[in-house]
Amino acid sequence: MPAPDEIEIRGRLTPNRALSELTWLRVGGPAEWFFQPADAEDLATFLAALDPEIPVFPMGVGSNLIVRDGGLRGVVIRLGRGFNGIEAQGQRVTAGAAALDAHVAKRAAEAGIDLTFLRTIPGSIGGALRMNAGCYGSYTADHVLSVRAVTRDGRQVELAAQDITFAYRQTDLPADMVVTEVTFEGPPGDPQALTDRMETQLRKRDETQPTKDRTAGSTFRNPAGFSSTGRADDVHDLKAWKVIDDAGMRGARRGGAQMSEKHSNFLINTGDATAADLEGLGEDVRKKVLQSSGLTLEWEIMRIGEFAPQEGG
């Protein structure tokens, strides 16, 4: 099998690429290989030729990610300009996986389509789909019609929403499948009213969350509500921030990492944190919450890669 740099591509392949500058928390080691495909065909060609033993990790904009200090083996794939288009027609919006959630919400609103729940969700559409992201009672799963993707062996596929199992903050999509495009459907709405609603949501978010700090969004899932979408049985009466507060961990620190004083379910890089500081503090919080309430918090932030040698694995 050819080495990654022996495969003919039209995109860009970079060895030993630093990932810390590409994540919102600004931590982590390098990717062994970093591939930015020109388009879906370029991506499919590359994956079809790539040794199946080489691991592949699709990376969005790094908004919900801790890359460990030892970096990642294999190939990190990050979609760029060829994958960020947004088109609205009727009540449907088709967006490239690299399009930002906020941009999709705004473009939809201009077209009189209500996808306003996406406006305050950090990150890109590919990540929102994988995580079944949601807020204000709406989930990505509620609006997905179809998904285009490239499989690990280089096949371009189209999946209907019913082909995907959506659950609370997760789907059953293979980890090495690269989502390239998502088509949504939303209810009609007045463009100005939708825009006004999003502005209100933004103000509320800025009042309650540490949006000026280096964070990766919510650190832990709420401890209740694991049904697939926003149905009546999908309740989140118990909030992660509340059990963190009850465990006395608001403002807790480890090295350069801190649980936010403003919202205790937000993990912050105060300036000089390592990935080990951040993940370690998160584990400290999980232990304290388990001792305090008997609840095991589940990470919402994805942690990937290898520990640096001095961390002892």
Image (spheres, helix red, strand yellow):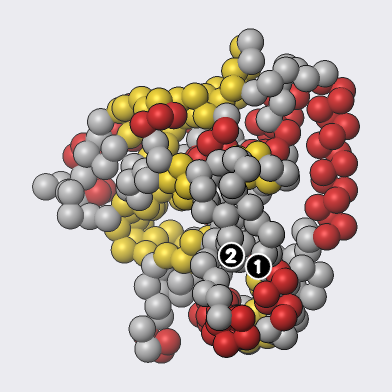
- Describe the element under mark 2 as helix, strand or loop: loop
The outermost residue toward the front is 233
Q: Which residue is drawn at 65% across and 39% down?
A: 138
Residue 223, numbered label: 2
Q: In this view, does 237 lie above or below 264?
A: above
Q: In terms of depth relative to the viewer, which is nearer, 268 or 23?
A: 268
Q: In terms of depth relative to the viewer, which is nearer, 80 or 231?
A: 231
Residue 240, numbered label: 1
Q: Where is residue 156 in the image (x, y as percent from the top left)?
A: 30, 28
The C terminus - image quarter: bottom left
Q: Which residue is drawn at 42% across and 87% down?
A: 311
Please identify the quarter of the rendering in which residue 24 is found: bottom right
Residue 36 in view in this figure: no
- Describe the element under mark 1 as helix, strand or loop: helix
Tell me the kind of residue under disc 2. Pro
Q: Where is residue 70 in the image (x, y as percent from the top left)?
A: 40, 74
Tell me the kind of residue under disc 1. Ala
**Label 1 environment density (alpha carbons within 10 Å; few <14, some 14–19, many ≥20):** many
Q: Is residue 230 above or below residue 207?
A: above
